[in-house]
Image (spheres, rainbow, N blue to C red):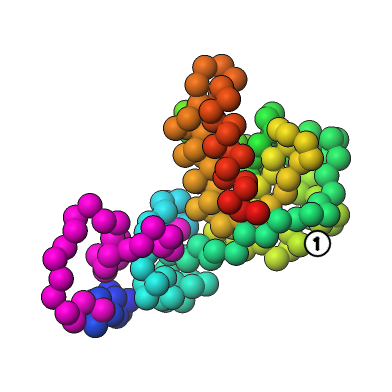
Amino acid sequence: MPGSVLRRIAQQANSRPAVRDDSAPRCELCADALDERHRHLLDTGSGAVSCACPSCGVLFDHGNGGGQRRLIRSRPRRLGDFVLDDLAWIALGVPVGLAFFVRDGASGAVTAFYPNPIGTMRTDVDPECWKTVTASNPPLSDMDDDVEALLIDRLRQPAEYWLLPLDECHRLTAVLRTHWRGFGGGPEVWEHVDRFFARLR
């Protein structure tokens, strides 16, 4: 059973007594302490993202014995030769210039999410439009279902296109929600967005 395996790993990792720091982030499966750059798991049923230590993360890589849980792999890739003209962008049905696209592993359907000051809006992408975009951009065939996303930033020029772990897209959403001010966001939020992309590069 995955639970017994997790408990055994946790016992081995905590063989030496230690003082628990309740303020530190902890694995949501075995309660082991985590560093700042820890891994995340996606529950494909609920869409919830949870924190995981390296040992627990390995158990759920590619769904190994994890049921609905999938490890969100950390492998951001910038797509420098991405092909997407204005008409193709409009056909995707996104009314703003910053969005990420996730393909559902069970149905194959693609959903567009676009961050905003109150959270994330979503819209279904027409399958034929997505096929057209994929045909022009072969790297999209390598995108992991459920846990990886195509992030498109057309707010500034030149536009940027990335294949990103889903948790990075959630991190960008949090940046916008935290720092947005007024109708247009204000200069502070875009400074933080610039830092987000600079860190990726």
**79 versus 185 height, above or below:** below
Q: For residue 132, say whether it is visible.
A: no
172 or 17: which is nearer to us?
A: 17
Q: Is residue 194 left or right of residue 136?
A: left
**Is residue 28 within the magenta segment?**
yes
**Is residue 163 within the magenta segment?**
no
Residue 155, how many percent across, how many down? 71, 33
Residue pictured at 26% horizontal, 68% vertical = 32
Which image quadrant for residue 10?
A: bottom left
Mark 1 = which residue?
A: 138
Residue 30, how many percent across, how many down? 26, 68
**11 versus 157 height, above or below:** below
Residue pictured at 54% horizontal, 64% vertical = 74
Which image quadrant for residue 186?
A: top right
Q: Which residues are magenta?
A: 13-42
Residue pictured at 53% horizontal, 65% vertical = 73
Q: Residues within 10 Å of mark 1 (few under 14, many from 20)?
A: few
Quarter of the image containing the N terminus? bottom left
**Amino acid marked by disc 1:** Pro
Which image quadrant for residue 189?
A: top right
Residue 94, how many percent across, how many down? 69, 34
Count of marks placed on residues: 1
Kindly give the residue lying farthest to the top in the view shown. 183
Residue 123, how many percent across, how many down? 62, 37
**97 versus 82 height, above or below:** above
67 or 12: which is nearer to us?
A: 12
Dominant secondary structure (helix, strand or loop) of the stretch shown in magenta: loop
Q: Is residue 192 left or right of residue 126?
A: left
Q: For residue 73, say whether it is visible.
A: yes
Quarter of the image containing the C terminus? bottom right
**What secondary structure is found at the residue carrying circle 1?**
helix
